[in-house]
Structure formats: structure tokens, C-alpha cells
Amino acid sequence: MKSYEKLLLENKAWAKEKVSEDPKYFSKMAKIQTPEFLWIGCSDSRVPANEITGTKPGEIFVHRNVANMVVHTDLNLLTVLDYAVNHLKVKHVIVCGHYGCGGVKAALTNQNLGIINKWLRNIKDVYRIHKAELDGITDEEAKTDRLVELNVQEQVHDLAKTSIIQKTWKHEKRPDLHGWVYDIKDGLIKPVCEMNYKTKLDPIYGFNDL
């Protein structure tokens, strides 16, 4: 049996199990989607949002990319954010990174990785902002772990800089923004930062007539 064929068999077994537990499981799922959370996570296969939070399908709206980035020119991310905030009316947006992130590790090197360089440059910018602190860390693993945390923190701030978030903060006082880091070694999530509609941003990032 080929590996992808096993995935299809597992899907059938999973669907059968769900229907045996609740005959209306899929009919109810098909009618409505009302997640409370938008999850912006890393594409790393070891960090599945539903499993590590113990949530069910329909409870978390998920966007994933390399190193859980919020890039203002990323139309994919912005479309997901707009849909989640303005249509699904999520109450919380979570940026979740993870220790041992390959994207963060690569950003700390000078290796030429082709088109990936353009994406990793955003993480290198985070390093530049926090260079004094990071250069003071001599242990490489500890330095990478700290950059993971600082990267999450900066991505949360980048969320707050968007007109999507600022407009909803102004008119609806939601969503709360959360920065978390998942530890693959023990399965636990560490909160690292939080922002909400009361947060004061540097005025340069504000928008008029929202």
C-alpha cells in the first residue's frame, strides 16, 4: 500500500467512527462555522492546532505558514485575517510559534536558500531589532528559542498594526491578540504576550477615518 492510500483509509475509518458516535456529526458540521479563535501557526507538521489545544473541528479557524509570520504584503494571511475578524467574528487571534522552528534557525544563518530568503528576511528583521539582547546569549539553542519568542511578539504587534484589527478594536472592542510558543519537547504552550483594544500603539501606525 502506498503512503497516500493509507491516508485515505484512515480518513474513512475516522469518518465512520464519528458517525457511530453521533449520526448527525457531519450534517451539523456542514451547516455552520462559528469558531471563537483564529490560529496563525507554523506549517511544521509537529504543531497541529487542534490536537495541541484539544479542540474539535469547527472551534479554531487556522492559517499556517513558515515560522508563523504576519507579513503585511501576504494577501493570503490578510484574507484569512479579514474573513476571521469581520465575517466569523472571532474573539481571539493567536500567533503560535514553537521552539526548534526550522525557519527561525535558518534566519540565524547566512545560508542562501533561494526564494525562501525573501520570507526569512522578515525574521532577520526581528533579529536586527533585538540584536543587543540576542547577541548577549552565547548558547545557540537558547538564542534560537529566544528569537522564537521575540518573533511571536513582533508578529502580534504586526497584527495590531493592520487596519483590519484597528477598525474592529475601535468599533467592537475585539479581538484580543495572543502570542504563544509551543514546546515540542513537553507539549506545553507558553504565553509570551497579549494585546487588546486598550493597547496604545505608536501613533505612526494609526489610521484615520476607520
Image: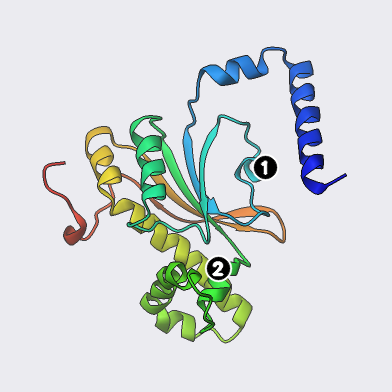
State the quadrant of the N terminus.
Answer: top right
Quick one: which residue is furthest to the right in this view? 1
Please report the residue visible at 43 percent of the width from the left and 44 percent of the height from the top: 93
Mark 2, other Cα within 10 Å: few <14 / some 14–19 / many ≥20: many
- Badge 2 amino acid: Gly
Q: Most extreme residue toward the front, as rendered? A: 2
Q: What residue is drawn where x is 28% and y is 43%?
A: 164
Label 1 Cα neighbours within 10 Å, binned few <14 / some 14-19 / many ≥20: few
State left or right for residue 5 relative to residue 115: right
Instruction: Give me the disc on residue 51.
Output: 1
Residue position marked by numbered label 2 in the rendering: 103
User: Where does residue 61 sit, x and y in percent of width and height?
Assistant: 50, 37
Question: From what the image shows, is residue 103 above or below residue 60?
Answer: below
Give the mark nearer the N terminus: 2 vs 1: 1
Looking at this view, is 43 or 144 the one in front?
43
Q: Which mark is residue 196?
A: none
The percent position of residue 53, horizontal first and vertical second, equals 62, 42
